[in-house]
Each structure stands twice: as structure tokens, then as C-alpha cells.
Image (cartoon, rainbow, N blue to C red):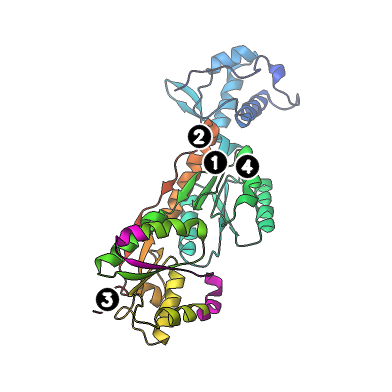
Amino acid sequence: MPQAQSFLGFHSLGQLAGSGVTPKYERLREFIMAQIQAGHLQAGQALLSEHQIARSLRLARSTVRQAMTLLERDGLVKRIHGRGTYIHEEAMQRLHRGQNLLALLLPESEMEFYPAFQKHFAAAATAQHHQLVVCNSTVSPRELVSTMERLIRLDVSGVAFVPPSNSSLILRSLRTLRERQIPVVCCYRPVADSEIPVLSLPFEEIGRMAGELISRRGHRRVLFCAADQPDTEAWTERGFRAGMGPGAEVTTLRLHFSARRAFHCEAAVSREVDRLFGNGQSPTAIFCTFDPLAELFYLVLSKKGLRVPEEVSLVGFGGLQRTGALAQRLTSIAIDESQFGSLSVQQLRRACHSLLARQPREKPLLLRVHLFAGRTLAEPVR
């Protein structure tokens, strides 16, 4: 534990600004809270003994004891019998954010694995005595900046969010959050040119796992279909090609796909299927980097009389928790949404400690990937 240090400028009762009507123990409590908020007293730092504080400030020891009792009740200090009193590791977080409100910003929060992620994030936040506000980040950059500013005014105790593809416009808001000692964690992918901690999907590992899975079944002519997210799809494709191994014929297709507008994308998928399967060199397997896109391919292929997986195998990427009949049938590389949610809350707590200790950003924490076996992968027709 760090050695006890005297408080900055803490030499007499006159330093404890406040009304003469305010009890002395309250003024001492408020002063210590201000010192924590200003960063002069940091997490884990040992305080002077009650006797030393009382002597320095010419206070009764009972007054100091009353102040410390209130601070301990508020979770700002902790007393260790026989060793002393220390600033609590979560003192800053508990101090100026009494409502303990966490913010979660999600794109298309009702789509893909985000509903389950939100559910488990909320459960983990509640277990830590936090409230939760969920915001939609699929808005214009200006509106997203406005949302960030509202969260700053609310003085939330932490923000976890899935960054937009072009996150440069929100860098200023992110810096303001960190300057206000509000921890921020990026989920899914990082924000370029920022010091924000990241809980990331292992995109290259996802691609490699899909490629190896398809290759082991004997497929050598495959389609890699991306949902037009260039900041992450390049990593996934690199891993996929590595997983397929040398000699594989990999065709890349990028579609401007949105789960909200899946119905409107059907015509584009239909055209691509006609083009790809109109000759003798058609792919025997398709990997889609987004489960809703894989489901759309399944429907289009079925409409055109192509059987899955008897004639074309299909692999997607999504979450482990599946509700729809088609989602349960689809073979996918998957992440565990419960792990995603709980780790996001843990990362926020670690980010708070890193801010208080002024530690550099840690390396991105990568989620584990799993296989959802499904029934849409088989050996190619010879």
C-alpha cells in the first residue's frame, strides 16, 4: 500500500471552506471528497491516522471519526483493521456520479446479437448496483455527438458503445468524457487515434475459423461475402483466406447491407446469385460476415431452387443465442453475448481504475469465438 501522505494545502480548519453553521465533520468530509475529485487523493492511497488529522487541523478526534464514518458509508474510503484507512478503488466513480448510471450505445439494437448483449450487459450492471440507459447510435454523426454531450451533462458513471464506421467526428466528445474522468469502453471495434480501451471481436480469428471449417469439408471454390464494413471486413477476409489455405479460389463480394433494410437488399443478392451460379465455376460454399445476410442468401438460394447445404453450403457469423427457426438452422461462427455483456461492464470498471491511476491504455481484450454447428454446411457435390 502507498505510504500515508498529508492532504494538499490541508493545514488548518480554515482550509475547510464552508458555512460556520455546517458541522465540522461535514466540512471535513466535503473537503476530502473534493480532494478525491481533484485527483489529489487517489485510489488506494493511505490517509493519515485520525489522530494525525485531528492534530493537524486542531479538531476533536471524534469529529474526524464522524467524517471517516460517513466517507466509509459512502464507499469512498475503506478501513483495514490494524493497517489504516485508504481511498477506495472506486471512490472517484462513486463520488460524483451518485446515480451510478451507465450508458450503452448500440447500432440497430434490435438486430443481430445486440438484444442478447444488451440483456447481459444490463444484468452485469445491475449486479454492480448500476442503472442503465440505452441509446441508438445509428443516427447522423451530429445527433451522435449530441447524444454524447447529453451523457456528459448527465455525468454518467461510464459509457460502453459500438463505434460507428467513421468515428473521427466523435473524437472530441470522447476526449471530453475522459477529461471528466468518465470511463469509456469501445465494444466490437476500436476507435482510431484514441486512447479508449477496447473489448473487440477477434475478426481475423473469426475469418480463419470459418475458412478452416469450410476447407475441412473439402470446399475449394468459395465466396466471401462482406456487409460493407471496410474497417473490420479486411481483417476478417485476411483470416478467412489464411484458413482456406493455398490453392483455394476465393471470390470476394461486398454488399451495402443493413439488417433494417434486409428486404430491400434481396434484389441485389438475387442478382449476385444469378451471376455467380450462372456458369460451371459457381462456388460450393458461401461465408457471410453477418448472420442476417447469410439468412437472406439462404432464402434467395432456396427461391432459385438451390438446396442448402446439398448444393451450396452456407456459413455466417453472429451470436450463440438464437431465436428464429432459420437462425437455429444456420451454421455460424459465434460469440457468447453473455460474456460480451459482462466483460463490457468489467472493462468499464477497469477503465475507471486506469483513469484514476493515470495508466496507459491496455491492449484490446479479445472475445472468444465458438462454433454454432447448425445444418447448413456439408461436403461439396462431386
Coordinates of residue 22 in the picture (x, y in percent): 72, 27
> The N terminus lies in which quarter of the figure?
top left
Q: Which mark is first along the chain, 3 or 2?
A: 2
Give the camera-side residue of 335 and 313. 313
151 up-or-down from 217: above or below: above
Whether residue 337 can be seen here: no
Residue type beneath disc 1? Glu
Question: Which element type, helix, strand or loop, lies under badge 4?
Answer: helix
141 up-or-down from 154: above or below: below
Q: Nearer the viewer, mark 3 or mark 1?
A: 3
Coordinates of residue 151 in the picture (x, y in percent): 65, 50
Coordinates of residue 153 in the picture (x, y in percent): 69, 47
The CA distance from mark 4 to mark 1 is: 9 Å
Q: Magenta stretch: residue 249 in it?
A: yes
Q: Which mark is first along the chain, 1 or 4?
A: 4
Q: Are marks 1 and 2 in contact (CB under 8 Å)?
A: yes
Which stretch is magenta?
Answer: 241-267
Q: Residue at x 34, y 81 (%)?
A: 280
The residue that mark 3 highlights is 380
